[in-house]
């Protein structure tokens, strides 16, 4: 049975933080108490050396976590059509539809992007993130559509992960949010961590990981605003939490916004429109764009008439 190996890079703001807290913040498959067993089994490493739960991080530490499988797992390839924007021997760039989960998780082992990539790419996916997330360098939420990349070998994965850690990858999103944003543009610079009252949610928490979202107004739609949000960092649910924090939750987001949502939507109205990165082999900057889904364009017009 193969364990799931997860690797993270500690950033400057993580320096001095206990590694058990850091691990729980960066991997959503286990709680902090769950990680206690992993530490006791010697399954957390810094620079290849096992460390204890009270280890204090240094900036630049490379943390590897060995997550044991709780049951035998076989993630099967599935012939699911993919909208491929670009592909070579190092990377594949996909336009993910709304409603597709990126990688398998407990209770959801089929019909994910990983199942589709395994069918399309065969063995040509990086193995750094283990059997559950082959090739996956970054994620977007199930109900978020748009551009996502995967690595087809370990060298490419390491290069792209390093670019993510240093915030040099371009990620621009479109969203519709509640209420009229008065200013034309702005920045939310607030730290994020697991919500102390609900571990399934993220929240603005003092002492959390630094998170920065830049936004600008594209169009004002009466009771709503159509925006572009650009990530400087890439924390879990970052745009959703930041926009809620400033009083503009995403339309359709019943987790961080109103429980009762109009228009019978399938989750938050959020689209990963632009992804740009330096190619891990050629060194060339490449940028890819996904047009707004049809439902998104129609929804803009509906919002105008509310």
Image (cartoon, grey):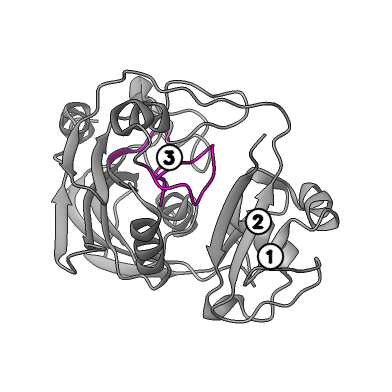
| Residue denoted by label 2 | 65
Whether residue 134 appears in magenta in the rendering, the answer is yes
Query: Quick one: SS at disc 1?
Result: strand
Whether residue 57 appears in magenta in the rendering, the answer is no
Give 258 or 159, whichever is nearer the viewer. Answer: 159
| Residue denoted by label 3 | 141
Q: Find the magenta span and give its range.
A: 125-146
In the image: residue 129, left or right of residue 91 = right
**Which numbered disc, 1 or 3, marks the residue that appears first in the sequence?**
1
- Mark 1 in CB contact with mark 2 (< 8 angstroms): yes
| Residue denoted by label 1 | 45
Q: Position of residue 299 (x, y in %)?
A: 22, 30
**For residue 63, which quarter of the picture?**
bottom right
Residue 288 visible in the picture: yes
Q: Is residue 20 above or below residue 86?
A: below
Could you tell me how far apart the alpha carbons at marks 1 and 3 are, in whole angstroms?
28 Å
């Amino acid at each position: 049975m193969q364990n799931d190996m997860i690797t993270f890079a500690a950033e400057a703001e993580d320096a001095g933080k206990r590694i058990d807290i850091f691990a729980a913040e960066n991997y959503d498959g286990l709680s902090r108490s769950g990680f206690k067993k992993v530490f006791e089994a010697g399954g957390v490493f810094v620079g290849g050396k096992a460390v204890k739960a009270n280890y204090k991080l240094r900036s630049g530490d490379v943390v590897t976590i060995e997550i044991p499988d709780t049951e035998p797992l076989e993630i099967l390839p599935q012939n699911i059509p993919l909208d491929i924007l670009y592909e070579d021997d190092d990377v594949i760039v996909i336009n993910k539809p709304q409603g597709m989960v990126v990688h398998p998780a407990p209770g959801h082992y089929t019909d994910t992007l990983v199942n589709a990539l395994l069918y399309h790419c065969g063995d040509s996916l990086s193995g750094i993130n283990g059997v559950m997330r082959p090739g996956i360098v970054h994620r977007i939420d199930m109900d978020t559509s748009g551009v996502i990349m995967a690595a087809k070998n370990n060298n490419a994965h390491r290069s792209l992960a390093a670019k993510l850690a240093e915030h040099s990858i371009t990620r621009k999103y479109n969203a519709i949010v509640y209420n009229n944003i008065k200013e034309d543009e702005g920045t939310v610079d607030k730290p994020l961590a697991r919500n102390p009252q609900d571990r399934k949610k993220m929240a603005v928490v003092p002492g959390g990981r630094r998170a920065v979202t830049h936004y600008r107004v594209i169009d004002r739609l009466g009771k709503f605003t159509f925006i572009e949000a650009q990530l400087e960092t890439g924390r879990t649910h970052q745009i959703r939490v930041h926009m809620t924090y400033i009083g503009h939750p995403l339309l359709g987001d019943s987790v961080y916004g109103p429980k009762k949502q109009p228009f019978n939507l399938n989750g938050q109205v959020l689209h990963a429109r632009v992804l740009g990165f330096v190619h891990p082999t050629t060194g060339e900057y490449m940028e890819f764009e996904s047009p707004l889904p049809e439902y998104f364009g129609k929804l803009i017009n509906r919002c105008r008439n509310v």
